[in-house]
Image (spheres, rainbow, N blue to C red):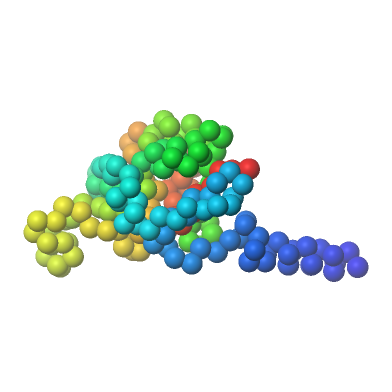
């Protein structure tokens, strides 16, 4: 009897309606949920580009070779959170397309100003392959580059204790943001 009750409870927890395991069907749309994890606002990548100031961060990631720098471009996460009233709690959850969830404190976001990277600077190889034109400065992030939405930090500004202990703050395929309960 007890085994059956546990099985039923686990089954209910995994139901599609459970917000903990909510599926997001389109990795090109960022969903921002309110404090009750309801009333979401949806932002296709193009809307993130046009609605918010897009800034550039020249940085490396925990997975690039030392000295290899990439210039990423996208809106500041703090700006997006403020607009949605999510900048007053203690922490925020960033959910990836595969339901990976990273909880990041607002103190970290305020201190290091990460961005939702949508684009990266074009390189000579991109121009040679035709991915970028000769006049094009940036190209959208591909899935192979952790896009279309990648949570990027200024690597060199992070405390050394963060690497590799806090690599989970570099979330790729971000599809949702919500305030932690």
User: Which residue appears at 45% of the width and 56% of the height?
Assistant: 42
Q: Quadrant of the N terminus?
A: bottom right
User: Which residue appears at 39% of the width and 34% of the height?
Assistant: 112
Residue 41 seen by the camera:
yes
Q: Position of residue 160 (x, y in %)?
A: 41, 34
User: Which residue appears at 35% of the width and 57% of the height?
Assistant: 45
Along the viewing direction, whichever of 70 and 91 lies nearer the viewer:
91
In the image, residue 26 sits, relative to residue 40, either above or below, namely: below
In the image, residue 42 sits, relative to residue 15, either above or below, namely: above
Q: Position of residue 136 (x, y in %)?
A: 14, 56
State the count of labels.
0
User: Which residue appears at 29% of the width and 42% of the height?
Assistant: 53
| 18 on left or right of 101 | right
| 170 on left or right of 134 | right
Residue 114 seen by the camera:
no
In the image, residue 111 sits, relative to residue 67, either above or below, namely: above
Q: Quadrant of the C terminus?
A: top right
Q: Position of residue 23 (x, y in %)?
A: 55, 64
In the image, residue 148 sits, relative to residue 73, either above or below, namely: below
Along the viewing direction, whichever of 124 and 46 lies nearer the viewer:
46
Seen as rendered, the residue at the extreme left is: 134
Q: Position of residue 119 (x, y in %)?
A: 27, 53
Seen as rendered, the residue at the extreme front is: 39
């Amino acid at each position: 009897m007890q085994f059956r009750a546990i099985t039923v409870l686990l089954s209910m927890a995994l139901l599609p309606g459970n917000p903990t395991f909510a599926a997001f069907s389109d990795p090109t749309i960022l969903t921002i949920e309110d404090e009750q994890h309801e009333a979401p606002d949806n932002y296709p990548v193009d809307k993130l580009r046009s609605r918010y100031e897009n800034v550039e961060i020249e940085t490396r990631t925990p997975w690039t070779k030392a000295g290899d720098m990439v210039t990423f471009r996208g809106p500041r996460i703090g700006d997006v959170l403020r607009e949605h009233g999510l900048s007053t709690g203690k922490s925020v959850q960033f959910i990836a397309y595969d339901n990976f969830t990273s909880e990041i404190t607002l103190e970290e976001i305020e201190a290091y100003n990460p961005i939702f990277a949508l684009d990266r600077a074009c390189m000579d190889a991109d121009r040679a392959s035709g991915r970028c034109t000769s006049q094009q400065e940036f190209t959208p992030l591909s899935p192979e580059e952790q896009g279309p939405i990648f949570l990027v930090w200024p690597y060199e500004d992070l405390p050394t204790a963060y690497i590799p202990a806090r690599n989970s703050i570099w979330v790729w395929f971000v599809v949702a943001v919500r305030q932690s309960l």
